[in-house]
Image (tube, rainbow, N blue to C red):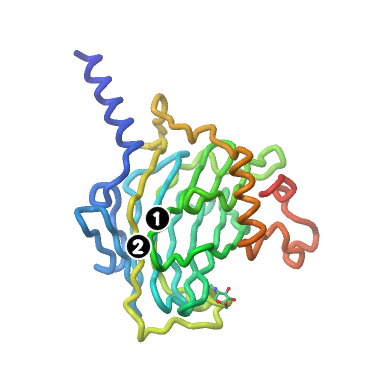
Amino acid sequence: MGRLVLFRAWFLAALVAAASANFLSDVEITWGDGRGKILESGNLLQLTLDRASGSGFQSKQEYLFGRFDMKMKLVPGNSAGTVTTYYLSSLGPTHDEIDFEFLGNVSGEPYVLHTNVYSQGKGDKEQQFYLWFDPRLAFHTYSILWNPQQIVFYVDGTPIRVFRNSESLGVPYPKSQAMRLYASLWDGDDWATRGGLVKTDWSQAPFVASYQGYAADACVSSAGRPSCSPSRGNWWDQGLDSGALQKLKWVRDNYMIYDYCRDTKRFPQGFPPECSSPRN
Ligand SMILES: *[C@@H]1O[C@H](CO)[C@@H](O)[C@H](O)[C@H]1NC(C)=O
């Protein structure tokens, strides 16, 4: 009897960790005073931004390592000045964070996908990309793989960025602080579009970004204790095979527009140590 109950508890926990989430049960809208809405029985979430406020939500659970997918359709038309985000973050001054931020643009001009990684409170690891499609027109899947060896950012299954664990070079790596998933839509017109030159056109408001298909195959951390085994997924020791490395190179060669590891103006004294690790 006791065993059966235990087995059931394990089985349910494993399901929760692996299942595709429903926004009604798995996230809470945390700000925006009604500007964030859960629709279609929890399958769709829309964030809006107007002159008074943006909006945002966060996962109810905290995670320590995992694979996260989110489908997003970004603000259509003239989205200049808007910033749409989806990221993992812990709390406090020495927090860890893994960021996808989408910087809008006037109609017909490309969004910029801005990525960053914070470890123990230190960011400054930006890479930026154009996308090979218009992210305003349809849902695309943006994923984060976070395991003890590496963090990989994916767009529709194509790896665009890898941040390897470089602790052996003295670079802190996010591995001990549980993170929550966050998403938001806000006005960043002082820097987002062409470095702040193009402002938000409020006559186009409200701006709307849509989220679907959130899935977390992850170790859920509750009261500081991660529970993942025995249900830990393939992601735990997943790396990039030669096919994936080829795709990564294709993205870097054709769509990368900024890499802190190549910014000599910013680092005249030499690049941060992790930049010597291939493809970080
Ligand atoms: C917006 O379009 C301009 C012109 O094509 C481009 O330089 C810029 O990178 C685009 N994206 C952002 C977010 O500024």
**Mark positioned earlier in the residue sequence (2 or 1):** 2
- Which of the four quarters of the rendered structure image does ligand 1 lie in? bottom right
Q: Quadrant of residue 268?
A: bottom right
Kind of element beneath mark 2? strand
Kind of element beneath mark 1? strand
Position of residue 64 measured from the top left corner of the image (x, y, whole percent)? 45, 39
The answer to whether 164 appears left or right of 270 in the picture is: left
View extreme (right): residue: 269
**Residues at marks 2 and 1 touching, judged by CB atoms closer than 8 Å:** yes
Q: Residue at x 43, y 30 (%)?
A: 232
Q: Residue at x 67, y 41 (%)?
A: 166
Q: Which mark is residue 32?
A: none
**Badge 2: residue crowd in 10 Å (few <14, some 14–19, many ≥20):** many
Please give the residue where the numbered disc 1 appears in the rendered image: 182
Position of residue 239 measured from the top left corner of the image (x, y, whole percent)? 58, 37
The answer to whether 194 appears left or right of 34 in the picture is: right
Position of residue 190 measured from the top left corner of the image (x, y, whole percent)? 52, 78
Up the image or down, 59 lies above or below 232; here it is below
**Residue toward you, 57 or 206:** 206
Please give the residue where the numbered disc 2 appears in the rendered image: 56
Q: Residue at x 64, y 61 (%)?
A: 254
The answer to whether 211 appears left or right of 106 in the picture is: left
The quadrant of the rendering that contains the N terminus is: top left
Give the total number of marks visible in the rendering. 2
Up the image or down, 202 lies above or below 72; here it is below
**Badge 1: residue crowd in 10 Å (few <14, some 14–19, many ≥20):** many
